[in-house]
């Protein structure tokens, strides 16, 4: 990084013309390619996300109490009014009131740098979660909804969206065991509360680094890791390191088994299975998949096995290239992500990064959304206390005719104690309010990028750039949804459909016609050569089968973990599934499953990435492959898919008619780029 800074300063000193050229960024590009302007400390603290109570950690208690008071009033309204559209509206207000606290707290507990805020947020998550579980087993509340759904005359008077939301709320009651006797209901609530604690414990553990004595590693590679006194801290796989020994050390140390976390995972899976059995399902996977596109674990496994068969039919070219790369770069059977990353980044990422400054990539996204959807970003300066780090950028998302659509808070840069993960958080869902105004959606995008310096912008490698596009796909799903009810806004849809908009963005990120619009060298202003984009796409194509097969393995492991109890360790299960679905040997004394954070949010649903990729592939081919800037197709995509959130069956959005999974499996498999 120091060398890059020196080169940049030298170039600017020696060329006034060049200096003027490379600093000509749009307001959005400039906002992300420069250090953030300091907040005026004399301003009044408006609280996190502009919520006044959250100017201090104690504000979470205030927010909780306010939500609970609203909850009591809304439950009374729902139970004491005749069945009708008002019933569903009241349920949605109830959901909105609780989600405004729970969703915000769900982000703060992992994203805020202040431990006091994180602790207060975690307590709020548990408290609100407990309230939700009790509401989901409230017989009187359920009866008010059942009276609506059992009344054919009233049901027929409802519009399709209202009817679907009513059915979704009833589904929540059913999977929570509303039909059980009182003692079993209490047991279900207890299991759900226990799961909240186990989920938090496991999720926190997946992000914790492992430590080793400094003397245990060769001196010449110690500098590659974080040194803390006499120990070395390893918080990732370092899979893109050019040094084989660094990759091997990181793999074995980062994935070394943690006995307490292994017990936590065992307890978590046992608790999930017990809950599922209690409420009438064969397994947790059966419970989790009820209501998805796949419907059952049997269909998921059929999908994964079909994919495996298709992959085995691929020409040997990719496999031969992969084998040669492995022979050249990897020994000692260090498998999984290491193999995949070595293969994918056979190209030199450092050659691409200068063309992918964060500002340039944000300009590219702004340009793409403007042409496709008439939507643009407007950088706004946060107020005092509104954001949790001075490096967070706030974007207003504005439509050319509709005006403000919502806000995206961009938490893109690394900092101590911040999770190394890329994700999208809903802070506030969109909905139509009683006064006719639309409640603007608010989201956070979290990445883990190096921050800019005074002389050098943040430079992304190709994988980082693709991840940025992926997460922005989630954000725009939230921004462009215009549902009547927040219960189904944006990404609040079937999990195996929620990844479609984000994966579709990956196709745009690797199309030269799109990349050529924004990828330019941050020092010279020169565009990224087409030959380099071609090499990038070729590396993805060659390794596409191996990468997809790795995802199949992850998805299959997730299914087995959440299927019927195996009476063997999670590591033994991993070893068997790895050999069956991936083919590379298990590395002794490792426990990759303890880094599988998706087991929490995607329990029994990790297959969603593969199924969503299949749908995204279909959308790309039918709508954007010919012209990635086609405005008519962009408007159609918003109108027929993004706008509905979860208010419409995903299969109906895909084709406009019922699409059987057999046809889907047979004809819409993910392509290999």
Image (spheres, grey):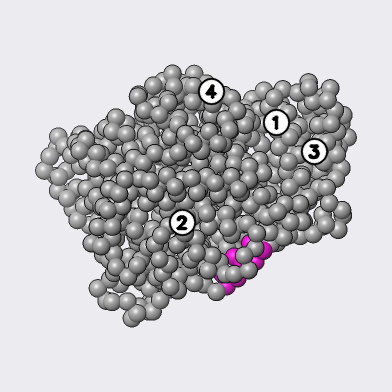
Sequence-wise, the earlier of marks 2 and 3 is 3
User: What is the crowding at mark 3: few (fewer than 14 residues within 10 Å), some, or many (at least 20)?
Assistant: many
Whichever of labels 3 and 4 marks the residue nearer the N terminus, that label is 3
Which residue is painted at 33% across and 37% down in the image?
510
Give the foreground label among 2 and 3: 2
Residue that label 3 marks: 74
**Residue 318 horizontal/vertical position (percent):** 30, 49
The circle drawn on residue 581 is 2
Kind of element beneath mark 4:
helix
Q: Quadrant of the C terminus?
A: top left
Badge 4 density bin: few <14, some 14–19, many ≥20, Cα 10 Å = some
> In the rendered image, which quarter contains the N terminus?
bottom left
Q: CA distance from mark 3 to mark 4?
A: 32 Å
- Majority SS type along the magenta span: helix
What are the residue bounds of the magenta stretch?
Answer: 260-270
Count how many numbered circles sit on residues in the image: 4
User: What whole-number distance in Å separates the C-alpha atoms at marks 1 and 4?
Assistant: 18 Å
Q: Do we see residue 27 in this rendering?
A: yes
* Secondary structure state at the residue bearing disc 3: helix
């Amino acid at each position: 990084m120091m060398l890059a800074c020196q080169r940049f300063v030298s170039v600017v000193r020696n060329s006034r013309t060049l200096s003027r050229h490379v600093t000509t960024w749009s307001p959005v590009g400039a906002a992300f390619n420069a250090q953030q302007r300091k907040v005026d400390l004399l301003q009044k603290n408006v609280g996190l996300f502009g919520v006044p109570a959250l100017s201090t950690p104690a504000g979470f208690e205030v927010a909780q109490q306010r939500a609970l008071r609203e909850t009591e009033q809304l439950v009374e309204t729902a139970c004491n009014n005749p069945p009708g559209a008002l019933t569903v509206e009241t349920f949605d207000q109830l959901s909105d009131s609780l989600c405004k606290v729970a969703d915000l707290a769900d982000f703060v507990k992992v994203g805020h740098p202040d431990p006091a805020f994180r602790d207060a947020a975690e307590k709020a998550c548990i408290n609100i979660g407990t309230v939700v579980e009790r509401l989901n087993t409230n017989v009187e509340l359920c009866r008010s909804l059942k009276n609506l759904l059992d009344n054919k005359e009233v049901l027929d008077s409802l519009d399709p969206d209202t009817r679907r939301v009513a059915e979704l709320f009833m589904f929540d009651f059913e999977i929570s065991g509303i039909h059980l006797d009182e003692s079993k209901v209490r047991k279900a609530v207890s299991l759900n509360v226990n799961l909240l604690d186990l989920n938090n414990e496991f999720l926190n553990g997946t992000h914790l680094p492992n430590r080793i004595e400094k003397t245990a590693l060769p001196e010449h590679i110690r500098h590659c890791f974080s040194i803390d006194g006499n120990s070395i801290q390893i918080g990732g796989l370092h899979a893109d390191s050019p040094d084989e020994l660094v990759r091997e050390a990181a793999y074995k140390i980062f994935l070394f088994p943690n006995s307490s976390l292994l017990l936590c995972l065992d307890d978590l899976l046992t608790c999930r299975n017990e809950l599922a059995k209690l409420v009438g399902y064969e397994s947790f996977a059966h419970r989790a998949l009820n209501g998805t596109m796949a419907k059952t674990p049997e269909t998921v496994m059929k999908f994964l096995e079909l994919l495996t068969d298709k992959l085995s039919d691929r020409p040997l070219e990719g496999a031969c290239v992969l084998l040669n790369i492995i022979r050249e770069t990897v020994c000692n059977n260090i498998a999984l992500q290491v193999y995949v990353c070595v293969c994918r980044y056979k190209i030199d990422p450092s050659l691409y990064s200068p063309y992918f400054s964060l500002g340039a990539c944000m300009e590219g996204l702004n340009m793409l959304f403007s042409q496709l959807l008439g939507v643009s970003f407007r950088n706004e300066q946060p107020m005092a206390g509104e954001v949790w780090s001075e490096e967070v950028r706030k974007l207003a998302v504005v439509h050319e005719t509709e005006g403000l659509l919502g806000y995206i808070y961009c938490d893109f840069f690394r900092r101590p104690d911040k999770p190394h993960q890329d994700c999208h958080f809903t802070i506030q869902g969109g909905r139509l309010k009683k006064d006719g105004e639309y409640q603007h959606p608010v989201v956070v995008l979290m990445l883990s990028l190096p921050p800019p310096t005074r002389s050098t912008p943040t430079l992304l490698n190709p994988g980082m750039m693709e991840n940025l596009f992926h997460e922005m796909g989630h954000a725009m799903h939230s921004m462009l949804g215009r549902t009547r009810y927040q219960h189904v806004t944006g990404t609040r849809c079937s999990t195996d459909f929620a990844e479609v908009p984000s994966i579709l963005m990956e196709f745009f990120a690797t199309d030269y016609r799109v990349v050529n619009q924004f990828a330019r060298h941050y020092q010279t202003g020169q565009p990224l050569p087409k030959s380099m984009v071609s090499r990038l796409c070729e590396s993805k194509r060659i390794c596409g089968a191996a990468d997809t097969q790795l995802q199949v393995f992850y998805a299959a492991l997730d299914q087995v973990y959440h299927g019927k109890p195996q009476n063997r360790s999670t590591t033994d299960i991993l070893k068997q599934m790895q050999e069956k679905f991936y083919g590379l040997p298990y590395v002794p004394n490792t426990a990759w499953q303890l880094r599988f954070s998706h087991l929490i949010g995607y329990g029994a649903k990790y297959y969603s990435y593969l199924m969503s990729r299949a749908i995204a592939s279909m959308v790309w081919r039918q709508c954007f492959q010919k012209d990635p800037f086609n405005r008519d197709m962009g408007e159609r995509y918003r109108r027929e898919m993004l706008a509905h959130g979860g208010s419409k069956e995903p299969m109906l959005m895909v084709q406009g008619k019922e699409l059987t999974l057999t046809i889907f499996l047979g004809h819409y498999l993910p392509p290999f780029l």
